[in-house]
Structure formats: structure tokens, C-alpha cells
Image: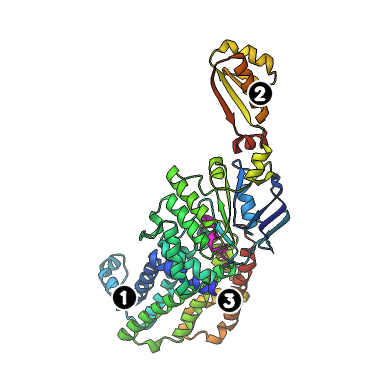
Amino acid sequence: MKGFTAFFSKEVRELIRTKRLMILAAVFIVVGIMNPAIAKLTPKIIEMEAETFDSMGMTVGEVKVTAMDCWTQFIKNIPMALIVLLIMMSGAYTSEYAKGTLIPLLTKGLSRSAVVLSKFFVMLTVWSAGLWLCFGITYFYSGYYWDNSAVKELPFAAFGWWLFGVLMISCIVFFSSFAGSAGQVMLGTGAAYFAMTMIGMYKKAAEYLPSRLCDCASLYKGELEPSDYFKAAVITAAVSLVLVAAALPLTNRRQL
Amino acid sequence: MNVLEVRDIKKSFGSKKVLEGVSFSVPENCVFGFIGRNGAGKTTTMRAVLGLLKTDGGEIDVCGERVSYGCTPKSGCIGFLPDVPEFYGYMNAREYLTLCGDITGIDRSTLKSRCSELLELVGLDKEKHRIKGYSRGMKQRLGIAQALINRPKLLICDEPTSALDPVGRKEILDILSTAKEQTSVVFSTHILSDVERICTQVAFLEGGRTAFSGSIEEIHAMKSDTALELTLARPEDTGRVTATFPGCTVSEGKLIFPKASDSDQAELMAFLGAQAIPVMRLERHEADLEDLFMEVIGK
């Protein structure tokens, strides 16, 4: 445990000193502000372009923006923030293995599991804080300009995205236990996502897949209930747990 | 008691056999020189001792505890300085040592004084900058400090002096000699003068085996056959000397008497005196580590 706490605080210090935390915070804040901003500006943009549309033979009527548009932006933009986070964290393990910075610490009795888990928890903390910060900002502006109650299940939808992010982070942890570089880790994580999309083509499988959690639009409109996400949520959580658990013995066996 | 016992360890990478039975032991409070050519398997052996490498056979005991792969001998026993130590560039030396201390579980109040003590020992106490700006010598010194943080019984240094300038080398050797009072030091090197300077025990690694292992005195005893080197004032006298001492050889105008005992030397001097042969120079050559090393590696 002492190894875990010492290494965890080292990780936090690393995030701050290498300015990665600042960049990520900026990304989540910008996305949070962008969601209502884009929704708010859409009518103006369309108005400005009205003439162009006119010349193309299209007539644009009055566009009415609601909270729904703002939250649609949220689910469109949050993946971007997640991808930035994943790319920035993809080398968290492999760069340490490659440089050999862990050797002096491991020979002092730091367990490899402590390394794997503390990095995982740091990523988890950053993702959780970032997502809910982004959610909070969007919620505040959306409530200020429009009416949030028009959109259903807001926190649950965000929770779905959060859980999906946890799975992606677990993929990084898992692939890092044997991959040689950040590129390979990203490739593996991307492949996992791709595989999920492929399986999702079977309609029957869709409700069991983690990607179901990203389908927030149906939730917002009330077409689906949170209970419809139950199976996907349980499977996502279980797969994440398995991936992280599998990373521990794999990392222990890894030649450093 | 021996701090480190290595018995017959073997390791191959694919079809390449790197270690084919390395054995040696390191007693308490000594500086142990682990000598071998580049690629002889020094680093491989050390990594095996640290549990960072899976061996194909053999046993390693550190402080009486068996070492197995993936699990470093319990903390407090071993300190390790890698050949090119890598640290977190965004920390300064004190922060790094504090991290190391936290990992080994030293309590904060002891740790603070321990850090100051070590930074002073390695001469980094006035250094406030972050590690990313450090020279290799400074990193090497910080490496020793971090290796000593938990007062290990065994300090393993992998070629600590190989890449340093003469000043840096001297500093590292001085620090290692000082460290000997608290711990046993094993250091690998191919710089023989370093070994002669501070080591009390040595092991030669050649062809994946320990070709020799013992104390510096044992080496000198083994090679007690001191050679004499004689340079005559008049080269034409050479024939008279070689006629009397058939064992000697002539090379570059010098007469070499291999394996000459003290009485051989007296006999030679008596002969030179009796024959009134003028001598320019007569020199005794103690066998040194280099001779033995060359003999061991068969060159």
C-alpha cells in the first residue's frame, strides 16, 4: 500500500509538471463551453448563410434551439475529449518500461501491481473529474439559456459515457502490459473499439455491447429507459475489471 | 556470512548462450569487482540477481533469501544502480530520493535527514535544479544516492564508471569506497585500474562462466612469478647473458626473465656484477590484474 500511495502521488505530480493535467482540463472545459455555444450559435450561422441556401434553392425557416440541441452537442463532443485523454495516456506505461525509469523503484520493493493500479486510478480520476466538469459546465449553460428538464436522464446518459471511458482506459492498461510502445497500445485500443462496432452490426448483440452506453440520444428522447442499458453497463464494468485484472499477471511476467 | 551467493546460473537468449554457469559469492563489507569484456554477461548476471530476469538454471541467494524472477528480494537488502540510470526529469534530486524513501517505507522524519545525508555524500546537496538538466556524472551520483537510501546490505552497480570522465570516475570510486563501510558493493566494470583501486574481491567473467573468483591477494599470490626486465648499457653483452640464462627472451633490446624468483634475481645480479656488465636498467614486474585478465580471456 505504501508503494501504491507513493507512486500515485508521483503520477499526479507528473501530470501537473508535464502540463498534461492543464491541457486535459482545458480540453474538458472547452468542450463543456462549446456544447451550449454551438447550439446557441447554430441559428445565427444558418441566418448568415441563408442567402447561400437561397441561391441553392433552399428556404430556411426559423430555427428553434432547445436544450436537446445542446445535449446532442455534448454526446458529439465528449468522445473527442476522451480520445485526447486516451492518446495522452497511451504511453503512460510503455514509456516507463522503455526508458527504464521503473527499475530503481522496482528494485526497492515497489510491486508491479502497484505501478499498474496507481496509473489506472490516476487515469480514472482524471477521466471522472474531466467528464463531470464538462457535464457541469454544459448543464449550467444549458439551464441558463434553455430548460434542462426537456431532456430526459441527463446524469444517467453522462454516466453511460463515463463507464464507456472506463472501459477504454482499461483497454490501455491491458494492452500496455505487453505492448512495446504507445502506438501499439493505441492500435490495440482502437482495434477493440473497431471489434465492438463490428459486433454491433448484429442488432441482437447491440444491447449487450458497451457501445450501447454511447447511444444517449435515445435516452434523451425517452425512447429508451435506463433499465434498457443495464445489461450493457454490467458487461462493460465486468470487461473493464477483467482487463485490469489480467494486466496484473501479464505485467509481472513482462521482461523489463 | 555471504551477502550474495550466486551458484551456477545459466541464461540463454534464443540460441545465444550468455551465461553458462556463473558462480561467485560476496562477503560482507567488501568491494567486489565483477570483471568481464563488453557483452560477457555482466549486466545479465546483475539483472538476474535483482530478479529482473528469468534465469534458465542455478540459484541466487541475497542475504540468505532465494531470488526468483519478478520478485525483487525484500526491500532493505539490495540497492541497485543501473548502467545508465534514468530518473523522472521533472523532479529534483531531493524529490526523487523522497519518492524512493516513501516506496521503501522510511518514515518522513528519518527520510528528510537521510536525504540530506546522501545528497551531501554524493555532492548534490546544493543542486536545486530538476533532473532533466543533469549531466551523466550527476545522474550517476544521484543513482548511488537512491541505491543507498534504505541502507541496503548489498549495493549493485552496473558499470558505474564506464561513461564518465576521469574526475567523475574518481568521484564515483571515492563514494563507493565510502559506502563500503555500510554495505557490500558489487560493481561490474571492464576498467581494470578501477578494480585495483578499490576492490578487495574480484570475479572474472568469460565465455559465460566465472573464470576466476577470489581476493586481490589471491590473484597476486597466483601470479607471484614476477618477471624481470633488464636493459643493458652495451647491446653486445646480450649474448653473454642469454648464454648463461637460457630461460630469458630478448625483445626490443630488452632481456625478459619470466617467472623469476627472488633468488633468480640475486643470481642474475651476482652474475652481472662478476662479469662487470654495465646495466642501464633492471626492473621488477609485478603481475597485475591486466595480465591475469588477458590470461583468463586467453589472449
Circle 3 is placed at which residue position? A236
Disc 3 to disc 1, C-alpha distance: 32 Å
Q: Chain of mark 1?
A: A
Residue A103 is inside the magenta segment: yes
Asked if B137 appears above or below A240 in the picture, the reply is above
- The answer to whether residue B106 is visible is yes
Disc 2 to disc 3, C-alpha distance: 92 Å
Disc 2 to disc 1, C-alpha distance: 105 Å
Callout 3–callout 1 Cβ contact below 8 Å: no
Residue B22 placement (x, y as % from top left): 70, 49
Residue B90 is inside the magenta segment: no
In this picture, residue B205 sits left or right of residue A23: right
Q: Identify the magenta region.
A: A97-109
Residue B5, numbered circle:
none
Could you classify mark 2 by the number of other residues whose Cα lies within 10 Å: few (under 14), some (14-19), or many (20 or more)?
A: few
Callout 2–callout 1 Cβ contact below 8 Å: no
Mark 3 residue type = Thr
* Residue B226, picture quadrant: top right
Out of B247 and B142, give the one closest to the viewer. B247
In this picture, residue B1 sits left or right of residue B124: right
Q: Chain of mark 3?
A: A
Mark 2 residue type = Glu
Quadrant where the N terminus of chain A is found in the figure: bottom right
Q: Secondary structure at mark 1?
A: helix
Please tell me if label 2 and label 1 are on a single chain. no
Quadrant where the C terminus of chain A is found in the figure: bottom right
Out of A32 and B83, give the one closest to the viewer. B83
Asked if B139 appears above or below A248 in the picture, the reply is above
Residue A233 placement (x, y as % from top left): 57, 80
Residue A37, numbered circle:
1
Circle 2 is placed at which residue position? B267
